[in-house]
Amino acid sequence: MTETEMQHYWQGSFIGEEEAGRRLAGLPAAVEAALADGLETETVLAACDALATALCDPAHPVHARLAPHLPEGEDPAVLAELGVALGRRELTRKLRRELGSATPGRLNRADPRETVYEAWAPVGLVAHIAPGNAATVAPLSIVEGLLAGNVNVLKTSSADTLLTQHLMAELAALDPSGALAARVIVLRFPSSRQEWLRLMCAPADAVAVWGGEGAVEGVAAHVPAGCRLVEWGHRISFAYLTDDAWSDPGTLEALADDVCLHEQQACSSPQVVYLDTEDEGEVFAFAERFATVLAARPPAAGAAAAGEADPAEAAELTTTELVARLEEHLGLTRVFAAPDGSWRVMADTRSPLTASPLHRSVWVKPLPRKRLIATLRPMRRYLQTAGLAGSRSDIAELSRTALAAGVTRVTPVGAMLESYAGEPHDGVYALQRYSRRVAVQADPARFATTACLDDLARPVVLPLPTGPLLGKEDVQEPARELARADAELYFRSGGSTGAPALSVFSYDDYDTQMHAAARGLLAAGYDPVGDRTANLFYCGGMYGSFISFFSVLERLGGVQLPLSAGPDHRATAQAVIEHRADTLFGMPSYLWQLLHTEADALRAYGGLRKVFYGGEHFSEEQQRTLREKFGIEVVHSITYGSTDLGPLGYQCTESSGGVHHLHADLHTMEIVDLAEDRPVAPGETGRLVFTTHARRGQHLSRYLIGDLGREIPGRCPCGRHAPRFELRGRTGDVMRVATYFLNHRRFLALAEEQGGHRGELQIRLDRTDARERLTVRVEQAPTTHPERLREVFLSGYPELRSAVTEQLLDLVVEAVDGASLDRSPTSGKLLAVVDARR
């Protein structure tokens, strides 16, 4: 078949007439099969963003393939405009504005304090009847259906090009999972083919119609009972000018912009200009002045060529102008028109709204504001945009009046055709019309730690990351060059493994991540109803931990004492006791110091029940001390994350030590070999690599975070499908000393398991004249015996013993006050390894 004959796109393939008719008969089964597989919002966003990049680049092969399918006379720049609309930033803003979240389909708790889960679910099948006069409407309508998770079947006019079909094919090709292709069908046939229209609409759950009353009526006959009919019909827009505004030449120029842009073919184009007056003379005078402005405008070109009047439109233009000229003899009108008929301004002393024949044809009418509602309300079903010009107080007053009359949007004159991501269309949000709000109520006792019901139902499948592995140095400079719109919140890392690094976020990204961290905290056993929390993370210096967990608790609605980590342990303990805090948030090293410094007071209080820690780890021996000495029942990681990537993992009540679930709705994780950039075998320890997807700002793909870990196979006993991994230290914890690789975690494990040590442990590396020196500094306690620990290290660590035996290394063990250990000045983290050899 020729390309012309293959004019239908059906779930990933171009097909001909006969095959399209056969498949239409089986449309219900095709829809059911597609809906059986879930569609992640990120799949849609990633593919659209990749397509947007291609459309905005005239040299890209995709742009070259699509340009020949543009309507005759259409400016190729329309592809770039479409690309901007399909970019991640715009679509994410649209999702947030219309559905409240960048992942609206996930069954998250509507209120963190209740086990009620709500989400936006697709209606199922959306049938789109596209207009024939706007090249971008059809593909954007399908994308809206995809963002809501629907299967979409779209009808284009038989006179249309195959632009939408090929656009959808390019979009589907950018999704290796095939989920998008399964949800897109584009058919090209005339409205007279009623049987196809019936087959297309019969199984639909919503039918979106773009067009006038005739088009809507023709489709409505095929819409089954209970199916939503979403009308995107023709609308009328007008400008309204106060007396001080219409005398301003700038206002007339701005008004001419609105009239000439798209030749009044958009619903938001002004067809009538109302003046806030009852004086007919002012109406005629303004019309004459405005005609002079229109006359100076260059003739229509480019896209406007496609907007030239057809014979029926030309007849309407001629008739409208002729009738208006005849009424001049009655003193009702006055007409100012171009000799070639390229524009016309028709002044009319009567106020009722009159549709324009378009093509730079404008009515000018008087309408004092006191009669605005009475005059316009009878046409409320057809009103869309009011472009206002006046003083600030006039704009405020007239906006309310216009909205009361039935207008759905108000803009400044000169901006009537402008829009923003997520803007309501004809008074409604499109994504909500293509969605259902659904809810699940669950047993509070059984689901107390379940923040998202989908975690128990199916794994999240995100697009696989590509590209090279990136380190901190690869992302620092790009972070400084981000567009200001995406760099709204600045954080610096704690600097525990080097110089503090800059990380930037948009507020939307930050909000997404704080909600994710909040869900993880619920999974770890935090109770937003019963727990009273002292937030003891470090604050200041652009360090984000305190601020982040303040935000997390705010989103959970939990009781919070925002104390932060301060040097006055007595004052902190007194605040905890006075305000009956039973839950502590903070760094292990700080919490350890606080608890032991104020042990008598806190043990006498006896009210501490939970500790959630982050940034470092409590060892098993330290956790045992917390339980035995202070009566703490729950000790869990508050989150696993980093300043630049945000929350990466969370613990459930079944997790302990370094075991975490991945925040699989935000990130994908890889584990690569310690020495080579290749995946490790299942269960082996390697370098952790993360790609963050739900991020509008700083893009981090295949980012080496500097941590080591291994994958935990199998599904967690908690029932969640999210992958699990175990942290195995940081790459900086592995030291090259005296030709051997030694690991800080190995020293800590030996000290606890064989040496009975329960405190902190730090390693310092120095050079002496003879050899290198490794000093193990352990926190002083009554049971601490440095010589005994030295024997434990030598006997339990063969590589260390060899280095000492070969006189390549001096080993020293010191017992010191915990306060004297080296820590990051920003975060307060214990520096595991202090390398003073450099």
Image (cartoon, helix red, strand yellow):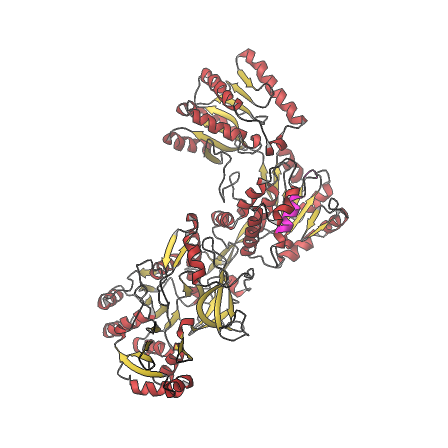
Residue 722, position as x, y percentages in the image: 51, 66
Residue ID at (42%, 33%): 400
* Left or right: where 299 falls relative to 645: right
Which quadrant of the figure has residue 271? top right
- Please determine whether, in this image, residue 231 is positioned above or below residue 309: below
Residue 71, position as x, y percentages in the image: 65, 38
* Left or right: where 761 falls relative to 160: left
Residue 559, position as x, y percentages in the image: 33, 60
Q: Is residue 252 magenta?
A: no
Residue ID at (44%, 19%): 278
Q: Is residue 166 magenta?
A: yes
Which quadrant of the figure has residue 581? bottom left
* Left or right: where 96 falls relative to 171: left
Depth check: give the residue in front, 296 or 431.
296
Residue ID at (40%, 71%): 732
Residue ID at (30%, 73%): 592
Q: Can residue 406 be seen from the camera position used here?
A: no
Depth check: give the residue in front, 609 or 766.
766
Residue 267, position as x, y percentages in the image: 55, 34
Name the quadrant of the C terminus.
bottom left
Instruction: Identify the magenta region.
Output: 158-170
Q: Can residue 145 be seen from the camera position used here?
A: yes
Outermost front residue: 769
- Please determine whether, in this image, residue 637 is positioned above or below residue 180: below
- Please determine whether, in this image, residue 41 is positioned above or below residue 381: below
- Please determine whether, in this image, residue 511 is positioned above or below residue 433: below
Main SS, magenta region, reads helix
